[in-house]
Image (spheres, rainbow, N blue to C red):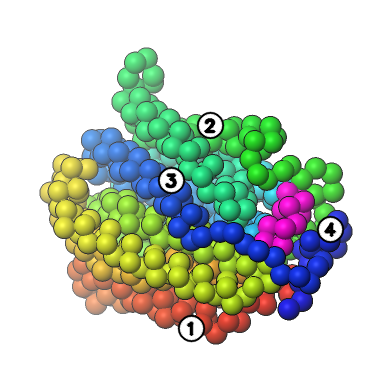
Amino acid sequence: MKQQQFDNTDRPAAMTSAKPQTVNLKIWDLAWPAIVSNLLFAVIGLISIKIIGSLGSEAVAAVATGHRIFFGVQAVLMALSTGTTAMVARAWGAKNYEEAAKVTSASLWLGNLVGVVLTVPCLIFADAIAGMFGLNENTTSNAADFIRMLSIFNIAFAINMVLGAALRAAGDTKTPLWIGAITNIINVVLVYLLVFGLYGFPEMGVTGAALANGLSFTASAVILLALWYGKRIRLAVGGKGSLTRARLKQLYQIGYPAGLEQLVFQSGFIGFLLIIAHFGTAPYAAYGIGVQILSLSMVVGFGFSVAGATLVGQYLGAQQPEMAERQGWKATWFSIGSMMAMSIVIMVFAGDIAAYLINDAQVVYYAVIFIYILGITQPLMGVEFTLSGCLRGAADTRYPLLTTMVGLIGVRVGLAALFTYLNFSVEWIFGALLGDYLIKALMLTHRFRSGRWKNKMKRYH
């Protein structure tokens, strides 16, 4: 099999040799630090919801809206991290560590630029963006303040996205774990202090939660940069010659479908939330709480997605496509089994957990129903998370875009709109999730089984 190029310059022998390389990584070694890191993040998220929930359902709805918009405008950064993952993993698998370093440096420069550009519209149009959900005036105002505050920290978010993706692609999932543990603790402490205004801190309510999130991103970014420039992590600093046209072109070609996917993804979520908001604040807040609770299960799938993307990329770089496929399927089965086990436990205690987070019987009622519905879909989500991650690790970023368009926009939002038109209850709207994840799981399984993703990198040189 012909070894693929990453750039037109600075290719050492390890990159151009036809000799297959050895990849000494295992799924669990890569997955468990990512799973633990994301579980910590999910637990901290639940604690934050508990703190914010004490302010009422309107505050929870405002934070849910703010987070959705924030991650929507980060679509370009997520696309960049996808390109970084594919290129760094492929270079690392080919033992071309210099190229991996240069890709990381180029990605970071580009990410910082994108972070600055994304900040401007969020600061100027925060009120208009929050207003499109049709929530009451107080909730809309709080959501706008949340969006405005969090957008100030876009550069810190970009640094976390790029360096975290590069480290995981190089097989280091433990460094992001311990950094995440530290920053999550910072986050929850600051949320508590800034929401309520304790120990001399200002009482900022919902805006305080956004400031706490932003400061924790900043702490994580500072630690990552200090380790990187201090040569304390396995990835070196790229140095002179990193920011080449060929390298940026590759990042763009691999990443832009992932960026479009995120735009479609976030647009679909916003459309779905708009439909739920039509039924009132209670089901809207319940959606935010339900997603946060089930994130305890979903982060397991994300962990195996990281492992799958890294292994597929590295094995392809090492010229072992059959091993890449084998590891992709293995990661998927691990994801399905783990997410099923977690979701069953969560569903059993759904009512108790929801009631602990917010003292509102109606919100708890809707949250439990939502958890049951989304809990049933966990095996399908395991397929989606892991196989889409594997495809992105292989630089096949267009097919996950297609599945998102069909599943999320066509099926979920389409069914939700139809059920609303037919005057069905909000429980039916929640049920549209089942169709979405079923279609995506079937499409991604077909694509991965076809093997067409094995030669995608040939198109990007």
| Amino acid type of the residue tagged 3 in the rendering | Ser
**Where does label 2 land, which residue?**
219
The numbered mark at residue 446 is 1
Quarter of image, res 85: bottom right
Cα distance in 3D space between marks 2 and 4: 36 Å
Question: Nearer the viewer's eye, disc 2 or disc 4?
Answer: 4
**Front residue of 341 and 70:** 341
**Where does label 4 land, which residue?**
12
Question: Nearer the viewer's eye, disc 4 or disc 3?
Answer: 4
Q: Indicate whether 8 appears above or below 137.
A: below
Residue 309 belongs to the span the image colors magenta: no
| Amino acid type of the residue tagged 2 in the rendering | Ala
Q: What is the x, y in percent for residue 304? A: 45, 61
| Amino acid type of the residue tagged 1 in the rendering | His
Q: Main secondary structure of the magenta part?
A: helix
Q: Which residues are magenta?
A: 91-103
Q: What is the x, y in percent for residue 445? A: 46, 79
Q: What is the x, y in percent for residue 114? A: 66, 48
- For marks 2 and 4, the one nearer the N-term is 4
> The residue tagged with tag 3: helix, strand or loop?
helix
The numbered mark at residue 37 is 3
